[in-house]
Amino acid sequence: MPVSAIIMLIFGCLVFYGGLAWCIYRAMKNA
């Protein structure tokens, strides 16, 4: 696995979990 693929994978996970955490944070604030 090339380094660029690993970086893309980590970046994708960060964006995905960051968006998920932001959605949960918004839901908690609005609740």
Image: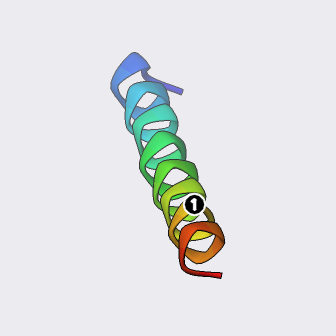
Front-most of residues 13 and 28: 28
Position of the N terminus by quadrant: top right
Q: Image check: 9 left or right of 25?
A: left
Q: Is residue 6 above or below residue 22?
A: above
Q: Quadrant of residue 27?
A: bottom right
Q: Which residue is mark 1?
A: 25
**Residue at image location 44% in from the left, 48% down from the top:** 12
Kind of residue sitting beneath label 1: Tyr
Front-most of residues 19 and 7: 19
**Residue at image location 46% in from the left, 60% down from the top:** 19
Which element carries disc 1, helix, strand or loop?
helix
Looking at the picture, how far across and down is residue 4, in whole percent? 34, 25
Which residue is at the far bottom?
Answer: 31
**Residue at image location 54% in from the left, 46% down from the top:** 13
Position of the C terminus by quadrant: bottom right
Looking at the picture, how far across and down is residue 3, in whole percent? 41, 17
Looking at the picture, how far across and down is residue 5, in whole percent? 42, 34
